Image: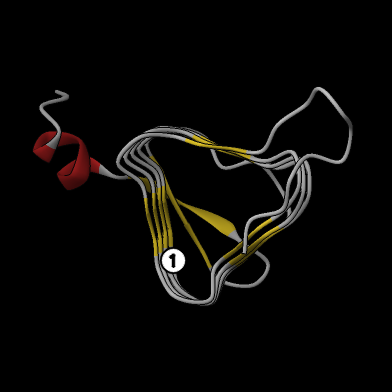
Amino acid sequence: TLHRASVEGQATTIGDNCLLMTSVHVGHDSHLGNNVIIASSTVIAGHVDIGDHAFVSGLCAIHQHCRVGAYSMTGGVSATRQDIPPFCRAAVVPCHMMGVIRPGLRRQGIP
């Protein structure tokens, strides 16, 4: 499900080449960048920004007003209550930083 913006003149946006799997919910006023993958049964609250090339695993919940950085990866069954920096891995409940995604960065051609 995709919710429209809560205020006239605003928007909920989904970038190019995104994959939203089954039972994904994107809340109002949220913005997904390009090439984002959101796995099954993930819920994204309102006013969430997800950067380009981010991957959010299945059964995750992202709290309102959080930012998920570009090229980040969120592990399955995670509850994100804070921002996830770009190029980082995060997992568990509550979500904790697990370090930088080195293999993923190399695959994208980023040294």
> Is 60 located above or below residue 33 in the figure?
below
In the rendered view of the protein, which quadrant contains the C terminus?
top left
Kindly identify the amino acid type of the residue bearing the numbered disc 1: Gly
The residue wearing badge 1 is: 75
Task: Give left or right: position of 50 versus 111.
Answer: right
Along the viewing direction, whichever of 27 and 89 lies nearer the viewer: 27
Answer yes or no: is residue 62 visible.
Answer: yes
> Is 110 located above or below residue 98 in the figure?
above
In the rendered view of the protein, which quadrant contains the N terminus?
bottom right
Query: Residue 2 sits in which quadrant?
Result: bottom right
Name the residue rendered at 66%, 38% in the picture: 12
Q: Position of residue 96 (x, y in %)?
A: 58, 57
Local packing at callout 1 (Cα closer than 10 Å; few below 14, some 14-19, many 20+) is some
Name the residue rendered at 36%, 46% in the picture: 18
Q: Position of residue 6 (x, y in %)?
A: 87, 41
Name the residue rendered at 17%, 24% in the picture: 110
Q: Secondary structure at mark 1?
A: loop
> Is 24 located above or below residue 96 in the figure?
below
Along the viewing direction, whichever of 108 and 38 lies nearer the viewer: 38
The scheme the figure's colours follow is secondary structure
Name the residue rendered at 37%, 33% in the picture: 34
Along the viewing direction, whichever of 43 and 1 lies nearer the viewer: 1
Disc tally is 1
Along the viewing direction, whichever of 30 and 86 lies nearer the viewer: 30
Q: Position of residue 33 (x, y in %)?
A: 45, 33
The furthest residue to the front: 8
Answer yes or no: is residue 80 visible.
Answer: no
Task: Give left or right: position of 67 versus 85.
Answer: right
Q: Position of residue 37 (x, y in %)?
A: 36, 54
Query: Residue 80 sits in which quadrant?
Result: bottom right
The furthest residue to the right: 7
